[in-house]
Amino acid sequence: MANFPKESELQLLRSHSPQERSHTSTERDILFAQEPSNEPRTRTWTISVGLVIASAIFPVVVFSLWVASPGIKDTIFMTFSGARIGGKFSQPEAKLIDVACSAVLAPLIMTGLNFLWFGSARVSTFNDQRPSDRAGIPLSTLVAVSTSTSGTYDPLNIRSLLRGKTHRLYLLAALTLLSAFSKTALSNLIAYEAFPEEHANQQKIVLRYLSDRAINSTSLMHQIFSMDPKTAFGFSREQQADIASQVTGLLTGLSFVSARTYLNDSTYVCVNSTENAMDRLPPNVVGLHHVPGFRLSVDCIPDLPSSVNISTSGPYTTVISTLWDNAPLLDGWESRKFNARYSGLPQDMQGSMDDEYPFAAFSMDATEVYLGSLVPSDRSNRTFFSPYGDIRPKAIDMKSSGFNGTKAVMSVYGIRCALRRQEGFLEYMRASDQSWSISTAEFSNKMQKVPSFLVRWQVILNYRSPRSTVAGIGPALAKTAGSNFDGQPDCSHNDTNCYYNTTDYSLLALNYLYASAEIMKKVYEVAAADKSRDEPDFSYHCYNTIVEDRYRITYIPGLLLTGLVSLFAAAAITFGMAMYSSNTYSARSFRQVDTLRLIVDSVDGLQSNIITDTNIPTLSHSDLHEWADQHQVTYSTSQNRVKLYHVEE
């Protein structure tokens, strides 16, 4: 083992010029002729190397478990989108987990690994073993080595390490970057994402029935002749104007588009709640359960009145009356007198050139309607097909109603219809656009005949369908159903009848059903908008489902892969450096060149031959760094003592 140079030898070396010293073998032999240390390894070195090996095995084990986990695909390794871990947390809880992993757990893991890696690296990076170190390294590089305690992206620190130009310093620079990569990956590995979770709401919500005391009054339902907006349904003028505009728009719309697209399996299903109450529900309410509702259907039969009379009632009201004599009615049908009241005069029909005059005549309680048509002349030899049965027109003498010419005898035909209501319960679901739809519905088998709300509006509105000769709602209901006189006779049936019609009587009935149901709903909606009409029994509680944002923990596969590779590479570099210097005295004694050690070594080894010979204390900051970059130092071992020396260039 080499001995430390004596003072006389050092003085001799200093007396030589740099060129002479570069060719003086004595100095090189004295300073650098070293042999591997026979000092036994300390327990600290053994434990350190074992932990370094464990730190290299850890990412391999984690990667193996990750690859073997269910649902992992080859493409997931390079994706930087979140992959689910799981959990159902509130946002503060998820944020706390994110912060705990990013700001606490990951830094703690990297602190432990950095303590292990850089502690070992400060032992093996620059020591007393290899001839390649004989030229020394800049003092600034040794300072950077002593302060290397964790990974960093600092380019100045990396530059200082690379100035040493040795393989182990290059590896230390790589270790510094890999440690920084690992910390970045682990700190950003865990994240969280929101997802909606539905669950039953413990608090019931409040809805309002489609109900109003004035509208529900039986006496008011019989006041079908009222045209005063103050008395119709008890509405104010503002309410009357509101409902009138809605009904007019509905009837005009039916003149162009049939009701078939608006109905559910030829029935009208409705929740027994106002739209305002539904719209006021919180946005997170996504389901309503066991909500009262009802279903309206229409039942029709072909029927012919015994007589038809057209007269006036008041200065500008026409009444088409259809009467049934004392002949027995079919079961379930009760009314024998129907009136179709509309604003206008009989002359409108008498002087027109139209071939068909559709009308809607209601029974006195409005529970039945006759959807009929009047056509000039006797058409009793014709047959019209309907899904409810064949319809054969009946000739009626109209002279008593003031008709003459081709209209002295007119033919009447049509279907008698009634609305049937079934009570039930609905399950409602809310879409992402906040619209409601029925998911399931259950209704009782009991059907109740109910009145139609259409009856008032023939007179109140003075309604006339587009391109219609006569006023009233009949033309609006019949327009999209077609006319019996637009097509050619069809005699291809096996019976003796030739069918002339193109009228879709089922569609005519559905138009009546939809118009009646929608107007009923609109009337109740307008009434419910007036809070002064509310009563305690109009409100009810309903079970509901709400959706809340929950948060699950996720991880970034790309960052996990990057982190594991960086951890393994950093551990491998540390292990390789430890094995490379394992036979040195510094390694066996686990002598770390940290900041404190460097200060002590500098005072011990550099004071006599550097500081006393220069004016170091007076140098500026930049000059001091330049001096440290230019002055080379190295370690030498003698008699189990390591000493720092300055090496002249």
Image (spheres, rainbow, N blue to C red):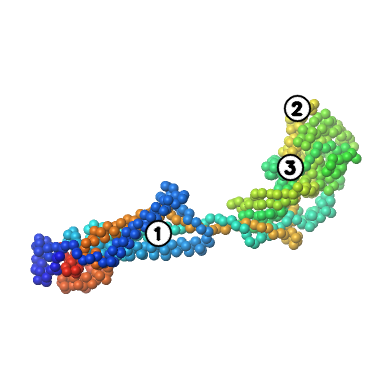
Sequence order check, earlier mark of 3 and 2: 2
Q: Residues within 10 Å of mark 3 (few under 14, many from 20)?
A: many
Q: Residue at position x 42%, y 65% from top?
A: 104
Sequence order check, earlier mark of 2 and 1: 1
Q: Secondary structure at mark 3?
A: helix
Callout 2, which amino acid?
His
Callout 3, which amino acid?
Asn
Front residue of 249/425: it is: 425
Q: Considering only vertical position in the picture, is 50 above or below 409?
A: below
Sequence order check, earlier mark of 1 and 3: 1
Q: CA distance from mark 1 to mark 3?
A: 67 Å
The circle on residue 493 is: 2
Image-quadrant location for residue 326: top right
Callout 1, which amino acid?
Leu
Q: Residue at position x 48%, y 54% from top?
A: 84
Is residue 86 visible to us here? yes
Front residue of 171/154: it is: 171
The circle on residue 511 is: 3
* Apparent side of residue 54 relative to residue 467 in the rendered image (left or right): left
